[in-house]
Amino acid sequence: MSLVCPVILGSVRSDRQGLRAARFLVGALEARGHEAPLVDPAALKLPLLDRMYTEYPRGEAPEALETLAALYGRADAFVVVSAEYNHSIPPALSNTLDHFLEEYFWRPSAICCYSAGQYGGVRAAMQLRAMMAELGAPSIPSLLPIPRIGKALSEGGEPTEDWLPKATNRFLDELTWYAEALRAQRRTGTPY
């Protein structure tokens, strides 16, 4: 079954490497027949959080928030691509995520983390797990850490190391299972 899985990129830096991972995951999801729109905070230019989307009078939220709310309302799952800044979540990612709440409810998330070093951003991913659970989109058990991202993926998002496509297939198989299960449950109703 086709799913809607927005890929939320977490960095706005001019030399960001996460765009490689985001492009790779968009392509991998689309190859499975899923819709995988890229949510890029650099393109959205969201303001620092002052009001959440739900705090605006109906129809008065900034256009970027209205667009994201419509997309998130159709979403079956979220893929979050996060760097690790000072052992934590990038501020642009936190800002992008924090504009919404109910739109995430009852949908799984999957975390792809990366770094220039050997740990692949896993310290940020641990904090992101707690954040995604609090938002109502708990992460699947598996992570997709990408160490040495500049070598693992080309600028266009093509893998250059053999392990990455295999690990990604397992990661997306798991996300698909959770997304289909929660979609079926949402159709029968939610606890509130």
Image (tube, rainbow, N blue to C red):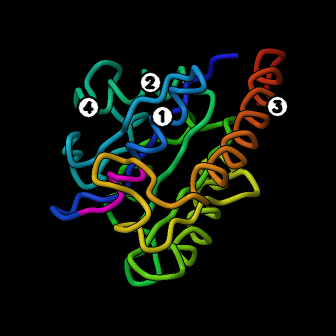
Q: Is residue 2 above or below residue 89?
A: above
Task: Tell me, yes or no, whether the highlighted magenta stretch contains residue 15.
Answer: no
Marks 3/1: CA–CA distance: 24 Å
Query: Tag 2's secondary structure?
Result: helix
Position of 186 relative to 21 (above/below): above
Tell me which amino acid carries mark 1.
Pro
Q: Are marks 1 and 2 in contact (CB under 8 Å)?
A: yes
Q: Nearer the viewer, mark 3 or mark 1?
A: 1
Contact, CB < 8 Å: mark 3 with mark 1? no
* Dots 3, 4 in contact, CB < 8 A: no
User: Magenta residues, as a range?
Assistant: 16-21
- Give the labeled residue for mark 4: 64
N-term-proximal mark, 3 vs 4: 4
CB contact under 8 Å: marks 4 and 1: no
The residue at which mark 1 appears reads as 6
Q: Nearer the viewer, mark 4 or mark 1?
A: 1
Spatial CA distance of label 3 from label 2 is 23 Å
Disc 3 versus disc 4: nearer the observer: 4
Residue 122 falls in image quadrant:
bottom right
Q: Amino acid at mark 3?
A: Pro
Q: Give the label on residue 163, or none.
A: none
Q: Which image quarter is the N terminus in?
A: top right
Mark 4 or mark 1: which comes first in sequence?
Answer: 1
Q: Which residue is mark 2?
A: 71
The residue where tag 3 is placed is: 191
Which one is earlier in the sequence, the residue at label 3 or at label 2?
2
Tell me the distance, in whole angstroms, between the alpha carbons under discs 3 and 4: 30 Å
The residue located at (72%, 47%) in the rendering is 170
Residue 73 percent coordinates (x, y)? 52, 23
The residue located at (47%, 29%) in the rendering is 36
